[in-house]
Image (cartoon, helix red, strand yellow):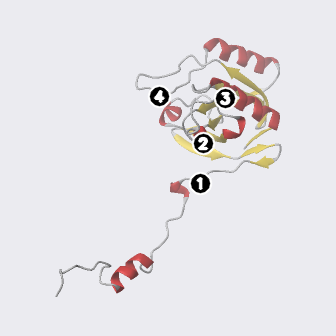
Amino acid sequence: MLRLTHALRDEIVRHLVAEWPNEGCGMLAGRDGTVEAVFPLRNIEIWDDLGYALYQAHPEDVLAAFQEIDDRGLEFLGTFHSHPGGGAYPSGIDVRKAMPAYPDAHYLIVGLKEHWGKGWERPGITDAEIRAFTIVDASVAEQDVLVDGVMLPKKRWWWDRPIPLIDKPSRARRRRRSTGGGRRLDTGGA
């Protein structure tokens, strides 16, 4: 579980919106799963060879953030980054880049997918879908996120939904069966 305040959530989203249409990134620090500080970082890798938006935090920013985390007596809790044109779920690249040295790290992902279709205007803070995950050995697990004690909704993915058991024909199949397939041939008279 990851806990943060409205003010810190808004700071994260403002940084990521400012980086749009590129991916933005940063680090989370605190104690016992409660975020007490966020560290916006510069993104030095904007696009890959195939045109996908990527992020790679600037090494100087990462070192400075870890130094401040240590100086303040905080723990590294994880990272945050945006998906400017996608949902808040780890991509294959995110899974491959997960940090094995930090198996308890949270990956807070802010999706701005709902903004697409509004044109090339900068997204607003309300366009953000925020979710957190842990990634260990390429296994992704969604974590609860509480903002000032209120649980953010989790999105149910198709693989989370129960598959309904079909014990009787659907209405459409019953209708086709009762009308002889639902089609009538025009014999041209007679």
When asked about the image quadrant of residue 101, the answer is top right
Q: CA distance from mark 3 to mark 4?
A: 18 Å
Left or right of 177: which side holds 19?
right
In the rendered image, the quadrant that contains the N terminus is top right
Q: Which mark is residue 52?
A: 4
In the rendered image, the quadrant that contains the C terminus is bottom left
Q: Position of residue 103 (x, y in %)?
A: 62, 35
Neighbour class for label 1 at 10 Å: few (<14), some, many (≥20)? few
Q: CA distance from mark 4 to mark 1?
A: 25 Å
Give the amino acid at mark 4: Tyr
- Which mark sits nearer the N-terminus, 1 or 2? 2
Q: Position of residue 38 (x, y in %)?
A: 75, 26
Callouts 4 and 1 close, C-beta under 8 Å: no
- Which mark sits nearer the N-terminus, 4 or 2? 4
Q: CA distance from mark 3 to mark 2?
A: 13 Å
When asked about the image quadrant of residue 28, the answer is top right
Which residue is at the far bottom?
Answer: 190
Q: CA distance from mark 4 to mark 2?
A: 18 Å
Q: Position of residue 114 (x, y in %)?
A: 60, 42
